[in-house]
Amino acid sequence: MIIVIKTGTPEAEISRIGQELYKSWGIMSEKIVGRNKVVIGLIGDTASLDPMQIQETSPWIEQVLRVQKPFKRVSREFRHGEPSDVIVSTPNGPVHFGEGHPVVLIAGPCSVENEEMIVETAKRVKAAGAKFLRGGAYKPRTSPYAFQGHGESALNLLAAARAATGLGIVTEIMDTADLDAVAGVADIVQIGARNMQNFALLKKVGAQDKPILLKRGMSATIDEWLMAAEYLLAAGNPNVILCERGIRTFDAKYARNTLDLSVIPVLRSLTHLPITIDPSHGTGKSEYVPPMALGAIAAGTDALMIEVHPNPAKALSDGPQSLTFDSFDSLVREMAVIGKAVDRWSTQPAMATA
Amino acid sequence: MIIVIKTGTPEAEISRIGQELYKSWGIMSEKIVGRNKVVIGLIGDTASLDPMQIQETSPWIEQVLRVQKPFKRVSREFRHGEPSDVIVSTPNGPVHFGEGHPVVLIAGPCSVENEEMIVETAKRVKAAGAKFLRGGAYKPRTSPYAFQGHGESALNLLAAARAATGLGIVTEIMDTADLDAVAGVADIVQIGARNMQNFALLKKVGAQDKPILLKRGMSATIDEWLMAAEYLLAAGNPNVILCERGIRTFDAKYARNTLDLSVIPVLRSLTHLPITIDPSHGTGKSEYVPPMALGAIAAGTDALMIEVHPNPAKALSDGPQSLTFDSFDSLVREMAVIGKAVDRWSTQPAMATA
Amino acid sequence: MIIVIKTGTPEAEISRIGQELYKSWGIMSEKIVGRNKVVIGLIGDTASLDPMQIQETSPWIEQVLRVQKPFKRVSREFRHGEPSDVIVSTPNGPVHFGEGHPVVLIAGPCSVENEEMIVETAKRVKAAGAKFLRGGAYKPRTSPYAFQGHGESALNLLAAARAATGLGIVTEIMDTADLDAVAGVADIVQIGARNMQNFALLKKVGAQDKPILLKRGMSATIDEWLMAAEYLLAAGNPNVILCERGIRTFDAKYARNTLDLSVIPVLRSLTHLPITIDPSHGTGKSEYVPPMALGAIAAGTDALMIEVHPNPAKALSDGPQSLTFDSFDSLVREMAVIGKAVDRWSTQPAMATA
Amino acid sequence: MIIVIKTGTPEAEISRIGQELYKSWGIMSEKIVGRNKVVIGLIGDTASLDPMQIQETSPWIEQVLRVQKPFKRVSREFRHGEPSDVIVSTPNGPVHFGEGHPVVLIAGPCSVENEEMIVETAKRVKAAGAKFLRGGAYKPRTSPYAFQGHGESALNLLAAARAATGLGIVTEIMDTADLDAVAGVADIVQIGARNMQNFALLKKVGAQDKPILLKRGMSATIDEWLMAAEYLLAAGNPNVILCERGIRTFDAKYARNTLDLSVIPVLRSLTHLPITIDPSHGTGKSEYVPPMALGAIAAGTDALMIEVHPNPAKALSDGPQSLTFDSFDSLVREMAVIGKAVDRWSTQPAMATA
């Protein structure tokens, strides 16, 4: 349930309404400040509340509306239709993820392999226009015998790449025991597809402060995905970015997954959270990445996450889906054409903050 | 197996090679004239043939290559990497479907309801830039009690709309018994998703002359879809256009199907046939259609098939996924922006041939 | 909507009610005679009818109930909860498919290859306890270059096997043009998975008299499958048997399909039609067939359809999933143990009618 | 790679071979004692090893065989074809899970609600024949606002039920932080479907001593599931039981999941690990549970996990899929009929150890 507040309502009255809700019905509430409106969101079992009674709490209340979805805080209605603007601090300055902003590029290798490769990659993707470096320190691998990531030492290398370029860092957390270490380096903490319903992890990551990238589970319904995001918001962290990375269907012969671009308009109608598309995992083959990246921008994504490796043929993981530096440069040029056509491209020169 | 012929080879020599293949090994062959090369495609059981022996048939043979796919005639290799250019005659002149050509728009209602609505729709979609009118005379419906289409009388109405606008007609065939009637009116005969593996229908439609739009089955793998197209080419008709219309996945709560845009680069690498995307059936909701149409163009589709209805709320079928005239006009303007950015948009004024 | 008639209602009154329904509301109706009750089923748009008004039509009416499902004639409610008993004539006498009867065995090769193999197979599966011989004359094949079945000549061989053994024949129809030929030989006409939503075929097969085996489409929902059966009943043929043959899921590495035994209790609750399980296509591997056949009997299937071939290694199609004669004999012995345990096994000696 | 040792080989020689493997090639190995044969399993990168060279290590080596699967320790080949016999200690004595043993029944509520209900349930399911009580202390719930389980206090209630009945306890671990508490009470630690690829959890649970029940992920391929089990064995715990609980397919209208009984023969051919079927989560509806439980026994399952609740209508979670005490009693009687028919039923009186 949400309460839409009239324009010009004094701060003190908004606080009073919140206190009144708690006193009279034991209901917790959150103030959400949008561009045009202030809204009070009500959490918990509001099924038995009478909107009319709440309306009478204050003459400054414009409307009382029920949220008709299983997810509450992540629902578009909870912000009265207004999209979130997730702002991520990076050494090069704040980066905005959201509908009104340029498409954000996140690029880098699947795994952090050594200092030279990660710093070199960071420099190249920054020069091409990326704002974030991705790179795995802890890698979820199907086989216990496969390379599991360099772990904590890889986090140090990500920190070095961050220091060298000013790029923000996106890296995955797999174990709650590593949370301090990961959140200490990452500007965005990633929760991977296989952990989308690892509720213990969601609760703990949601309780820390760094923005979170939540990948969609391999066969997660949209409701399940948004409910996973709801865990994060319910734990206190509103800075959540959703990331589609390909779903599992009946055909995996040519593409590793089926990248579901059609989720973009569905998410737009349901949630205020920003959307990222990962065409690298989504397709599993580097030659399929460019058309999907271009399609994603035209379809309205807010960000893209793309695997780039100095030498994909020798990558320790996911080589077949990684772009070379040159092919990434070339893709960015193509993306800029679409991005400008839809007025979602940064006109700022990429090197300005270097 | 294909034989690549040297540039400048006399016609008589090409014929001689074909005859020689038949005489010596009992193998049927087809001459395929590409933009740069002439290729002879070999059909049938070529597994036991020795490429070296075939090479010796003529000094004009440049190369002999095996087609490594289960599908042969539809494989990209069969045309030595060159895309097909499917040319469809319409009263307004020939329309090209293929990689080197502007994106073709096919628009119209799910079902033909009456003369006024179909002629009015034809005029409006033509004015907006469509080259083809779609409209169902025979409708595949899950329930035997649902409206099954107006049948043969609807074909006459399509003919009237064609006469009034010069647009080409795309309409579905469901029963081999209706083939003459449908092919008599249609400029492109459509085979629907539910009949993609109706092999009796494929054989008969493949044996007639009108170009064919082959929709992907709801859970057809890419191989199965291309093998269905192979049935059409094997029956003699090379003018086949593939149409993705959404696949069945584990989540149908918000969108009716999962529109698989990621099939575009996969098909490009496997086949020379042109690609159409149907975002209307693919999503099942009119508000999801525009982002998917834009995404499809950026991802490289050759054509789009979009449902448009004068009054979606009163449509006899598929109303929720149909655009109004005004929303289609508006979508075409948005598509033109992307289409021009990727250099795949007709610069010809839409009304020129009216 | 159904009307339950009181026990002892005179025939004339039942007819009068039917006429009255038609006169007053233009509604068609069908009399359905169950073991305990007579029911009148109402077809067509009954949404606006008032049950109270219908109740007043006759004092012999016990109850008027709405059918709450999209399917009507196939719904369990339409027979007031009573299962159908589909009786199929064969030279050896009538065979009953249904809940109160022994499990029926249908066995034979994927394709009819020659007279010797089909007659020999018929004799062996009869000796083991089968009541029906299956065998494909027309084969739906993914590739146009694969063996398509021997067609009409294979139908003659099936007739010969029928004559030699008295077994009923189950064979597939793919093209409405072959209907007379197929129905002339078959005791049960099979509609294959790929044609489950070939509505033109359903309408024509539903309009002939032979019982029909309707296979589930590869990714057909239960509703779609039952609606396909509804097409058959709506066309006039009440003798429909449903056949589960494996569905398409995300994993086809080891088994060709996922045999969905869990559909058995779901169908039981929704429909009165008998159920057959095909573990051969369902798994695609002969070693998986016996456990699935045993599981199906324990879970309550009414019939089993099993591929048996004199020499699976040399079969023209589907060899890997065919049992040898000896392994079929051995499976029948295991099935008899389960069948007797659940009181669904024929105690009649298998050879009695030979 | 495995080394099959000749019957009668001295212990010292087996040790020597292991040491030799490590010295010469740096390869770790494990001795596996089967009923008929002793096998040495080689772990790690054995791709470059020459079987001939290893054969020459000792005249007591019968055969050296490559394991052709991505999973090693869990593969059937790794035990030279012999099934595992997982023995679980309970207060009532050891219980065997495996092919040569009676079907084991695990029963109980979804969540532990209070002492009375859990102790009462334990007594009733024990009287019916169950050897284990299931009950959730920590519950994975899609919504953060749904009941999350009573946590540690529920573990104490499970301990009380164990003390009262002597039944073994099966309960789920969701967070590595709870491992000591859960393993302190559980006789079998359960890893749930949503955590099947939570590799951090797998590694830690695999490193403790209690037997483990590993549920299949909702859309896990068989390879992924077995690789998850491989994580557990690689971490040191060989006592792993696999549990199928329904997979996600395209149809969830009637059943919550599609219970995949066809996985039974596939697992049998691939792995030596015992198999449990959970028809309660697998179908989501109590009326579907009995046919599926019966089918599972006939198809060869080693154990069944069934939800039973004193009052399903008031259950805090998963009520619709829970059996009442009476319906569980009645199901056990039906299961005994099938279990005895296939010689997989305990003839020991159920109450003997009470």
Image: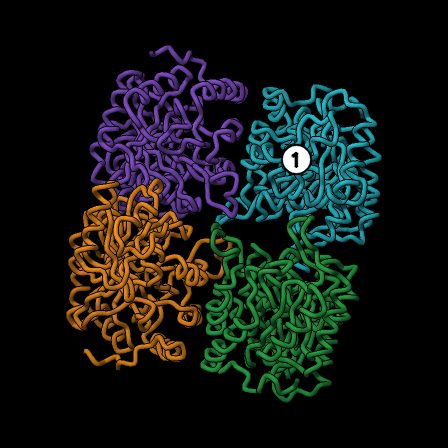
Chain colours: A purple, B cyan, C green, D orange
Of helix, strand and loop, which one carries label 1?
helix
Name the residue located 43 percent from the left edge and 35 percent from the top edge: A281
Name the residue beneath numbered marker 1. Answer: B51
Can you say which quadrant of the picture contains the C terminus of chain D?
bottom left
Residue A61 falls in image quadrant = top left
Q: Nearer the viewer, residue B243 or D300?
A: D300
Image point (58%, 34%), residue name? B264
Badge 1: chain ID:
B
- Inspect this view and state whether residue A98 appears: no
Residue B93 placement (x, y as % from top left): 81, 27
Left or right: residue A285 versus residue C91 is left
Q: Where is residue C186, by image quadrant?
A: bottom right
Residue at x-position 63% and y-position 44%: B225
Question: Against C10, is B247 above or below?
Answer: above
Q: In the rendered view, does C83 fall on the left or right side of A24?
A: right
Residue B166 place in picture, x, y as percent: 81, 31
**Residue A121 visible in the displayed image:** yes
**Left or right: where does residue D19 sit relative to residue A346?**
left
